[in-house]
Each structure stands twice: as structure tokens, then as C-alpha cells.
Amino acid sequence: MASEKINELSLLDIIENILKENKEPISIYDLIEKAATLKGLDTQDVDQMTQLYIDITMSGKFVFVGDDKWALKDGHLEFWDKDGYAFIQPEEVEEIDEDEIDFSEFNLADVEEVEEELEDEDLEDLDEEIKEEKAYVDVGLDLETTDEDEGLDDIDLDLDDDYDEDDYNDIMDDYEDMYDE
């Protein structure tokens, strides 16, 4: 491509021309690097390269064909409606034969012992944390009130100190009887 023509083209048009010339899918990173080099851009400019990556992936001109490669949509009709997850091959899970598993090495007593040790360590850590908190609280700072109504009389709540549980139960029994009728 002539350098005068390249300066007039957008980066997406340059990438389109690169793909037309190669006629094979190309890695998106190679496309970005080739287009930036042809256009005379700094490939280390992360913002510009990120924007170009987004433009390629969002453009309707290109299609993802798997293995991190992109191609022109023209001539790749089978990939038009495929999503990127269509190209991920699930890993095969190898089934383990029960005869291969050695249960003789597994000892429940050892597991319980380790769990007890961990619980003991956790309790020790908790005790240390409580001691640290008490030391912090017991610093002995003079606390000042921030109560704005300091001069006003405190409200005296008259709590029923003569609460009688038998009276309460009688009331509740009467209440239940009312609804049973």
C-alpha cells in the first residue's frame, strides 16, 4: 500500500486491507501491530492499542474464527452467528478407577487431630485479639459528653419492676380462649 493512501485510511480500513491480502485469519494482536506500524503509530501507546482492539471486536466487518484469530466476515458465513464461547473446547475429565484410589492412607483420626489443632490455634488467636482490644479500651481517656441537652433533666423511664409472670400467663390464656370460641 502506498504511504499516501495509508495516511488517508482509518485503522479499521488498514486492517481490512491486511486481511484481504493475506486471505487467512490473523491473530488480533498481529493485526493491531501491523496496522499501527503501517500508520506510524506507537505500539506501546496502550490507550490507542486498546481502542483499536475494541474497534476491531465491535466492528461488523470482522469475525472471530477461534484460536485468537480474526478474518473478514466476507467468505466466513459459518462464523457470523457464533459467539466466542463456541470455540472453547471443554477439557476432558479423566475418570478415576476406584481400584486406583488408595484408601489405606486416609486416617480419620489424623484429620480430627488436625482440625482440633486448628480450632485451638483459632481460639488462641481470638484470645490475643480480645486482650489487645481490652488494652486499647482500657487506655483511660477522659471522655467528654457530646449530649446537647446536658442541662435538661434526664427522662425517667418507669419500667415495670413488679412484672408478674403469672398475671401475664393469665392474660394470655384469656386471650387464647377468646379466639378458640
Image: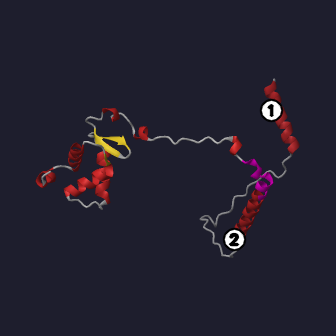
Q: Position of residue 155 (x, y in %)?
A: 69, 58
Q: Is residue 116 above or below residue 103?
A: below
Which residues fall within the magenta stretch?
A: 102-113
- Judged by its main secondary structure, the magenta piece is helix
Name which of mark 1 and mark 2 comes first in the sequence. Answer: 2
| The quarter of the displayed image where residue 88 is located | top left
Point out the residue furthest to the front here: 99
Residue at 39% from the left image edge and 38% from the top image edge: 83
Label disc, if present, on residue 175 of the rendered structure: 1
Callout 2 secondary element: helix
Residue at 26% from the left image edge and 34% from the top image edge: 75
**Alpha carbons under labels 1 and 2: distance apart:** 52 Å
Q: Nearer the viewer, residue 160 or 142?
A: 142
According to the image, label 2 marks what residue? Answer: 132
Residue 111 falls inside the magenta stretch: yes
Q: Nearer the viewer, residue 10 or 171?
A: 10
Point out the residue furthest to the right here: 166
Q: Is residue 165 above or below residue 154?
A: above
Q: Nearer the viewer, residue 54 or 33?
A: 33
Q: Position of residue 76 (x, y in %)?
A: 30, 35
